[in-house]
Amino acid sequence: MTINHHPDDATIMAQAAGVLGEGFSLVVAAHMERCPRCLERLAEAEALGGELLAELPAAEMAGAGLGDVWQRIHEAPAAEPPKLRRPSSSDGLPAVLTPYLDGGLASVRWRSLVPGIRQHVLHGIDSGRGSVRLLGIAPGITIPHHTHGGGEMTLILKGSYVDEIGRFQAGDLADLDPSVHHQPVADTGEDCICLIATDERLRFSGMFSRMLQPLIGI
Amino acid sequence: MMQAVTTTTDIPDAAPKPSSEEAVRWLQAISAERSRDAFERLYGQFAPKLKSYMIRQGADPATADDLAQETMVQVWRKAEQYDPAKAAPAAWIYRVARNLQIDRLRRRKLHEVELTAEADRPDEGPGGHERADERPDADRLRELVDTLPDDQLDVVRLAFFEGLSHSEIGQRLCIPLGTVKSRMRLAFGKLRAAMGEQL
């Protein structure tokens, strides 16, 4: 899989600092499972975090600090077994998504929004006024022109789409500013399945699209 | 040097910073021999910094003590997962502390790819980098942090230490979101250049 679109470096720094919201960090982690380039960049940004930590002035620990630590260690002395990476499901769903979609893509309970567009909202992720959802776009179908009150991050899981920015295929991540105005079209013979996180509601710009908004609910 | 924000709990760094290699040996001694001596040296080096980090993230001093201790307990328990080929000790300990504060102070989930020694890396296809197993050079990083312009260092520290999102940093500094992001990108670009990566 050749990945051509990656998160913004500022987004990678935010992930390393731990300030990305839950929804965005989920989409970024799902991308990074397949993207050695971005994993490497994240390690570099975390190295910066380590260096900043090492340069902090020391704050004196309360008196019994070290004794307390030994006591905590002795209360539960076992070394923590290394976490095994969750296997990704057979249909190519990234492993970080399996807690939210345990049956894989095949058993997603889709809800049809309008002909050619279906969605499934992932629950249990704190996204403020936004959301994390899967969107399935049938071949040739266009998502109406929209901008974003906040950011939008989209990871392509299957298929592809084309918009004003370029062509996005499986593994690509579109990291969009509030200023971006775009209109994606699924451009191959198979459905385009995307994972989309937002932190604000989308704003549709055309009259017809605005009428659709309450229906689509994104 | 970073400008130290002096508080009543700050104490001066008496001893010179141990090299990254020294801390690598401590972590390996903890992992291989459960060395209490190595752990106490690592504690002496990092616990006061971890407390400082937790205070900057908004913890009161008692909570900061608790979280610094808990970070060190996790360092003891997870030492076997530390892989010196992938991260400097400070970077690895930073990850443990960051994940703990996100869980305890922010009560959020951080989704991340597990980077344990056992985790298999995805096959590197065409265009993949082959440097992924090389640990970023901590000494060059230290030089870099010293040379970052204040406006870039400020946004970096507000994110890494005060836990502010990019839009919160924009509000704090009264600058547009795009400016926050471009300063982040510039700082990161210099970091990568300093570590010998191609931009």
Image: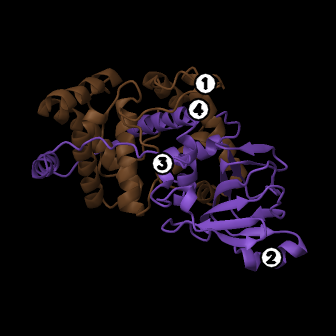
Q: Residue at x 50, y 65 (%)?
A: A125
Residue at label 2? A212
| Residue nearest the viewer, comparing B100 with B22 | B100
Left-right relation of B89 to A166: left
Image depth: mark 2 or mark 1 in front:
2
Q: Which mark is residue A37?
A: 4
Image depth: mark 1 or mark 3 in front:
3
Mark 2 or mark 4: which comes first in sequence? 4
Question: What is the chain identity of the residue bearing mark 2?
Answer: A
Near mark 2 (Cα within 10 A), the count class, few <14, some 14-19 or many ≥20, is: some
Image depth: mark 2 or mark 4 in front:
2
Question: What's under tag 2, amino acid-wise?
Answer: Leu
Alpha carbon of mark 2 to alpha carbon of mark 1: how far?
Answer: 47 Å
The secondary structure type at the circle numbered 2 is helix
Picture colour for chain B: brown
Do the residues at pointers 2 and 3 share their chain?
yes
Left-right relation of B195 to B64: right
Asked which colour scheme the image uses, the reply is: by chain
Question: What is the chain identity of the residue bearing mark 1?
Answer: B
Give the quarter of the figure containing the C terminus of chain B: top right
Q: Which mark is residue A58?
A: none
Q: Picture quarter containing residue A136?
A: bottom right
Residue at label 3? A95
Residue at label 1? B193
Mark 3 or mark 4: which comes first in sequence? 4
Alpha carbon of mark 3 to alpha carbon of mark 4: how far?
Answer: 18 Å
